[in-house]
Structures are given as C-alpha cells and as structure tokens.
Image (spheres, grey):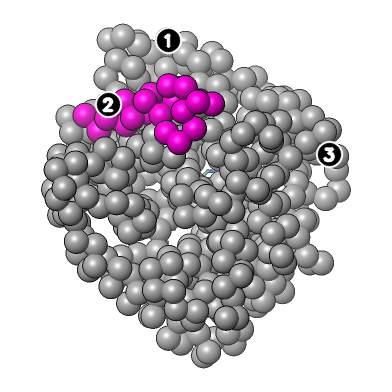
Amino acid sequence: DIYREVGRVVLKGFYFQRSDQSLTVKYAGEWARPAGHPDTSVLVHPSAAGAARPAGTKISSAGGWYDAGDYNKYIVNSGITMGTLLSAYEDFPEYYRSLETGIPESGNGIPDLLDETLYNLRWMLTMQDPADGGVYHKCTNASFDGMVMPGVTRDPRYVVQKGTAATLDFAAVTAQAARVFGKFGKLLPGLSDSCRKAALKAWEWSLKNPAVIYSQDFINKNFSPAITTGEYGDRHLDDEWFWAAAELYATTGSTRFASRVGQHLQDVKRIPSWSDVAMLGFYTLLRNETKSKQGKRIDTRPVSASMLQMADGLISSQGVNAFGTVMGQSVKDFIWGSNSVAANQGILLVNAFLVSHDQKYLDAAISNVDYLLGRNATGYSFITGIGTKSPMFPHHRPSVADGVDPPIPGLLVAGPNPGRQDKCEYPHTEPETAYVDVACSYASNEIAINWNAPVVYLVNAVQALSGKIGK
Ligand code: G3I
Ligand code: 9MR
C-alpha cells in the first residue's frame, strides 16, 4: 500500500483549490480559510459581448477550482485536468470506490474523485452561453491578484471571449462526464443528460465557429479593460477537434463523429499537455466500445500499436539516464511544468501496460513516480507535504499568505525549467536542475491543476495495479 497515501493526498490537493467554499477545520485542518471569490456576479467583458448578453451583463459563474497559484479559472486548462481525472476513474473504477479524501461530500455514495470533479464540472457548465452554446475562454480578474488570501481583493471578475479551443475542450469534458455520471443517475438525476446536451451544443457552435483563436494581444488592442492574466492561447486546434469527436463518439455512438475520429487515427501520438490533447482521445478510443449504434467498428489496432511504439521509445534508453528514470532522457522534457511531462509519460506507460499486460511498462511508469518523489537531480520530492525534502515555498497565493509554515499539502510544483522566465535567482541552471524553492519562482515552483491531475492518475494507477507488480 505504499502509494495509497500519496495518491490520496494529491487528490485532496484539489479540495484546497475550491474557489467559492469556505474550507473548514474538519476538512482543511490548519489550512482552513474563508471562501474565496464568490463569482456570483461576473461581468461579460466587451470581447465576449453578444445580442443577448451585451458588455457589462452580470452572470453567475460560481465554483470551480482556482487554476494554479493564481485565482483565475481557465476553461482550456480545466479541460485536460478534467479529462485526466475522469479517465482515472474510467480506468480504475473499483479502486476509486474506496479512495476517501475527507471532503464534505465523502460518504455520499459517489466516489470522492468524482465528487471533486463534479465541483469543477458545475462551474464549467456556467461558462457556456445558453444562447448559442459557445464557451467563454476564462473567468478572470483583469490582472493577477497580489500574493494575498483568496477573496481579500474585490476587483471585478470577467468572462472573456468565447473560443474554439475552450468550446471543444468543454465538449470533450461534458461528453465524458455524461458517460461517467450516467452511472450515478439515481443520485444525480438529470446531470448526465444536461452534460450530453451541453456537449452537443458546444460541438454545434464549434462547427459554425471552427477557428476562433483566443489571443490576448488582439483583445487588448480592441477592448478594455486589458486582460493580462494567463493566456492559454492555442493556435492548433486539430487535437481539440479530435478529442471532442472521440469523447462524443464514445458517449453517443453516433456515426456523425466517426468520420472526424477516423481522419485522425494515424496522427502522430504525443505526450499530452494543455494545448495538445489528442492523446486523451486516443486513450478514450482504446478504453471504450468503438462500435457505432449501427454496429460499425473503428479499428483501433493502429492506435494501440503506435502507443506501444511510443512507450518502447520512452523505455529504450532508460538505463542510460543517470537516475534510471524515463523522465529526463531528453532536454525537451524540461519545459514549464516539466513535472507534468514526467507524470504524463507515466500515464502513457500505464496505458501501454493496460493494453499489453507487459510488466516492463509498469516498471517504467514507476520510475517516473520515483522521479517525482525525489529520484531526480534536485533531490526534491516535488509534491508539497510528501517526503523529507519537499517544496516549502511554492508560488501559490494561499500557501504564501496564510501564515501557516508548511505549504498546503498535495500540490505538485512545476519542476525544473531552464527557461527561467520568472528571472528569479536559481542555484543551478542545467535543464534538470533549473529549479528553485522560492515563492518568486512562478516558472519552476508554481502549482497547477493540470499538473496535479496526471499525478493523481499515475500514483493511484500504480497503487491500483500493485497486486500485479513483481509478478
Ligand atoms: O511549446 C514550446 C516548445 O516547443 C519549446 O521547445 C519550449 C522551449 O522553452 O517552449 C514551449 O512553450 C512553452 C510552453 O509553456 C510549454 O508548455 C512556453 O515557452 C512557455 O511560456 C509556456 O508556459 C506556459 C505559461 O503559463 C506561460 O504562458 C505554461 O505552459 C502554462 O502552464 C502556464 O500556465 C499558467 C497560467 O498562464 C496562469 N496560471 C498559472 C499557470 C501555471 O504557471
Ligand atoms: O503570479 C502569476 C502566476 O500565477 C502566473 O503563472 C505567471 C505567468 O503568467 O505570472 C505570475 O505573475 C507574475 C507576472 O506575470 C509578472 N510579474 C510578477 C508576477 C508574479 O509575482
């Protein structure tokens, strides 16, 4: 059971990111705090104005997790985060039935993992314009709050321009949610249907608006106030189209999505990131029935073959790496949020194990769990509260401002990033050592939901499969 506690703690990390709830001592211990941004009266930014909702219209967009060390809520980044967490459940439903994190919903008949995702799903649903199905890119301040507790500042909050990346990511997540929560119809009546309708409406909007790119530069030249918070801009939407089509296909079995899915089966497979979500669609095709209502089947053999090829590539030179980990064989692994690269490589290897049952993939996945827990060139366990040497000063506003010495637990920091865009002082600058545990360092020591989610998946997957290890 050695991974179970880590798996529990990283899932609990999401509870601490809840925006509009007060975190009570019962669930949050010494990190209890009042509710943060209520977001019950958010302004429609001029970039998002339409006939039914002119600029300045007030809407409610309450709930949802804060994205990261900042207090904004971004649909694109929620997309991969939710897709990863819902996939964790779809791959290991039995395991998650008994994983309790100690949240207000614990014991309500729904696994805590799903209760946690439900909290963010309900927020995501508020981000869809009921008039046309398009989805606002984010719910945000005009500029970042200072390093203060959530809810202390009262600056206006906005929903900004609808975009195709956000709308397709939303379609993918709500389609997957319709499938997952459909099994809890008695406890959550109507939810699955609402999600399915929302997904289809988002898809329709995207067909009419196939390439609306979110560009903050463009917005700030044309509208005010200027928006300077995280951009999550993405100009390549092939992968979002594919992911949404794959989730809609898996959920509805409708042939209208099959041709879109078919067009992408041969696409090059890559480790996913917030801007590159195709892999989530491939995992879904491999895990779900790929038969349409009419009985027509998508041949997924080329998908599993190329996934295994990719997994083989990842393990081929593992022994050459000084630490014997899959992570860090290439300098290209060390981007902003490199620790999520390690976690997502691990997920790919778990999926390779799931389709092949070959032990070597699981062993390789575990090497990246080890990487994240300290078997790396910095010696840090990169998860707050876990291990004897872990980050004490993450770029995370509540952890900085709450007056409690230890940071909020269960949060994965970004990790080594030779880009060092924050211009802080780093003791080392080589790709694998360019990390510094100071709150200044938003390029190596921030936390983010899209980095935590793959650790939730990976660590719990390894725990769930542990009966199989060493056999
Ligand atoms: O894609 C290129 C790659 O081709 C190139 O080799 C590499 C070289 O450094 O750069 C890659 O792009 C980087 C990209 O992250 C990789 O995902 C960009 O330089 C880098 O600027 C970009 O950083 C993003 C950062 O925001 C700045 O925009 C991170 O991905 C993203 O996770 C981060 O997200 C922020 C939100 O904006 C605000 N909330 C906090 C969150 C976490 O820091
Ligand atoms: O605090 C911000 C962090 O959450 C973002 O990820 C990061 C990149 O967008 O930006 C941080 O804000 C910094 C800003 O970009 C530049 N001035 C310093 C801010 C940090 O104190």
Residue 213 image-quadrant placement: top left
Q: Residue at x 84, y 39 (%)?
A: 29
Q: From the viewer's perspective, is 69 left or right of 250?
A: right
User: Few, some or many C-alpha atoms within 10 Å of disc 2 (few <14, some 14-19, many ≥20)?
Assistant: many
Q: From the viewer's perspective, is 203 left or right of 310?
A: left
Residue 298 image-quadrant placement: bottom left
Residue to which mark 3 is pinned: 29
Residue 6 image-quadrant placement: bottom right
Disc 2 marks a residue whose amino acid type is Lys
* Range drawn in magenta: 182-204
Disc nearer the start of the sequence (2/1): 1
Q: Residue at x 69, y 45 (%)?
A: 100
122 above or below 389? above
> What separation in Å lies between label 1 and label 3 (alpha carbons)?
39 Å
243 above or below 434? above
Q: Residue at x 29, y 51 (%)?
A: 289
**Residue 306 rendering spot, x and y as whole percentages:** 28, 72
Where residue 201 is drawn, which disc sits there?
2
